[in-house]
């Protein structure tokens, strides 16, 4: 057994130091980023916010609202017919990831859809990205489809980021073990990594190889999103912050015919397992919980709030574009 005594930080442990600068006007601050991906050699440009592939937030409606500038990971519980219709439409191609796990059924599903319509972005999502089997599957996916953009995770440490980029030939590594709003991994298993430090360390490893990272989980406010981007995240994935909106595929709680709240639950919760896998296997514990999110109206309001927060943060530190935010950032630790 070893103890790592280096302090590791979460979003709440830091603030961003304001800096004297010729503050650029907020209206001119550019939030669009342009990336060239390491292994697919494809390029992407847009605002690097991604809706999580949870069954509530990874909906077709969310993709329509976030696109074309922001991305959505479409959840994997849609029927093949619905996925064919969606991915067959050109306007959705560039702003949506096709999500799979690592089972044979997942690969067969992707193959079947790809035979009929082009799928450019694939998100391979597993709770534990530390298994050899996971890397093998990503390698196989790359061999089958050299030009697709692969986002893979989740991991939280740099050696695994490097391995997935080099051996697995993924393009974007999803970072986050345990920070999610409805995640109970830390409580159930004791495993995890404070998210801000995970991003800093993983982004550093990825950028050294010209790869990219997506910070996944734990953002509760626009300020947390700013901190993730300032820490080096190339993309930020959101679940809970996008829940509660009209675009969610959700069970709504209504009063007098009006939406007041929606049910939101982890994809490894008992609720999700009962819904999709016929209940929980007796050898495992649920690593997700249920919550209720108050109704927030259309997602466009929240997106405006997020973009406004990021622009304002850039102005505070003297960054003229999101690209410069990280370079211009000094984090200060709270006492
Ligand atoms: P949030 O933005 O809500 O804080 O976090 C969203 C992320 O939490 C998702 O993208 C996913 O990575 C993670 N997540 C979703 N459901 C579960 C779950 O049941 N268990 C765990 N450990 N993580 C989850």
Image: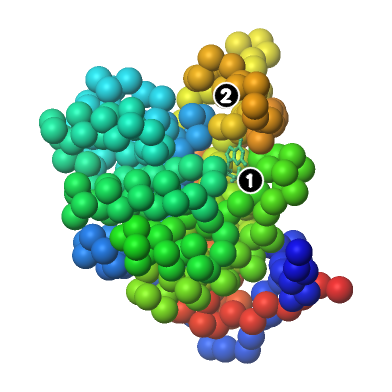
Question: Farthest front residue?
Answer: 1
Mark 2 falls on what kind of element? helix
Residue at image position (51%, 82%) is 327
Specify the farthest residue to the right. 335
Q: Tag 2: Cα neighbours inside 10 Å, few (<14), some, or many (≥20)?
A: many
Horizontal and vertical percent position of residue 57 = 49, 35
Residue positioned 51% across, 29% down in the render: 56
Q: Answer with mark 1 or mark 2, whichever residue precedes in sequence.
A: 1
| Numbered tag placed on residue 269 in the rendering | none
Q: Is residue 47 left or right of residue 250?
A: left
The answer as to whether callout 2 falls within 8 Å of ligand 1 is yes
Q: Position of residue 216 (x, y in %)?
A: 54, 52
On screen, residue 306 above or below 41: above
190 vs 152, left or right, is right
Residue 192 appears in view:
yes
Q: Is residue 305 visible?
A: no
Secondary element at image label 1: loop
Is the residue 286 above or below the residue 323 in the image?
Answer: above
Reading the image, the residue beneath label 1 is 180
Write the residue at 59% across / 17% down.
279
- Closer-to-camera residue (317/87): 87
Q: Does residue 311 lie above or below 265 as drawn? A: below
Q: CA distance from mark 1 to mark 2?
A: 15 Å
Q: Locate the N terminus and report the quarter of the image it occupies.
A: bottom right
Instruction: State whether label 1 is within 8 Å of ligand 1.
Output: yes
Q: Where in the image, quadrant-wise, is ligand 1 located?
A: top right
Q: Which residue is mark 2?
A: 272
Position of 22 relative to 171 (above/below): below
């Amino acid at each position: 057994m070893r103890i790592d005594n280096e302090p590791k930080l979460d979003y709440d442990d830091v603030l961003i130091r304001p800096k004297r600068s010729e503050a650029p006007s907020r209206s001119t601050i550019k939030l669009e980023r342009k990336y060239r991906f390491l292994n697919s050699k494809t390029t992407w440009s847009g605002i690097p916010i991604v809706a999580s592939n949870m069954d509530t937030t990874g909906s077709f409606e969310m993709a329509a609202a976030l696109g074309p500038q922001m991305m959505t990971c479409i959840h994997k519980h849609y029927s093949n017919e619905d996925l064919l219709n969606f991915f067959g439409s050109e306007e959705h191609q560039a702003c949506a990831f096709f999500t799979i796990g690592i089972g044979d059924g997942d690969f067969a599903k992707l193959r079947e859809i790809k035979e009929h319509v082009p799928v450019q972005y694939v998100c391979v999502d597993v709770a534990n990205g530390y298994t050899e089997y996971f890397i093998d599957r990503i390698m196989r996916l790359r061999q089958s489809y050299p030009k697709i953009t692969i986002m893979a995770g989740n991991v939280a440490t740099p050696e695994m980021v490097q391995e997935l980029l080099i051996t697995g030939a993924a393009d974007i590594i999803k970072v986050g073990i345990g920070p999610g709003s409805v995640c109970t991994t830390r409580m159930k298993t004791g495993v995890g990594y404070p998210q801000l430090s995970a991003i800093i360390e993983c982004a550093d490893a990825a950028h050294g190889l010209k790869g990219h990272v997506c910070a996944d989980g734990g953002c509760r406010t626009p300020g947390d999103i700013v901190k993730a981007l300032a820490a080096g995240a190339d993309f930020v994935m959101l679940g809970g912050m996008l829940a509660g909106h009209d675009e969610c595929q959700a069970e709504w709680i209504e009063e007098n015919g009006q939406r007041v709240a929606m049910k939101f639950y982890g994809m490894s919760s008992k609720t999700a397992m009962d819904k999709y896998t016929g209940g929980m296997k007796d050898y495992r514990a649920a690593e997700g919980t249920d919550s209720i999110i108050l109704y927030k109206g259309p997602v466009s309001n929240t997106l405006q709030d997020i973009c406004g927060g990021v622009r304002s943060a850039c102005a505070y530190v003297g960054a003229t574009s999101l690209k410069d935010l990280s370079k211009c950032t000094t984090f200060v630790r709270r006492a």
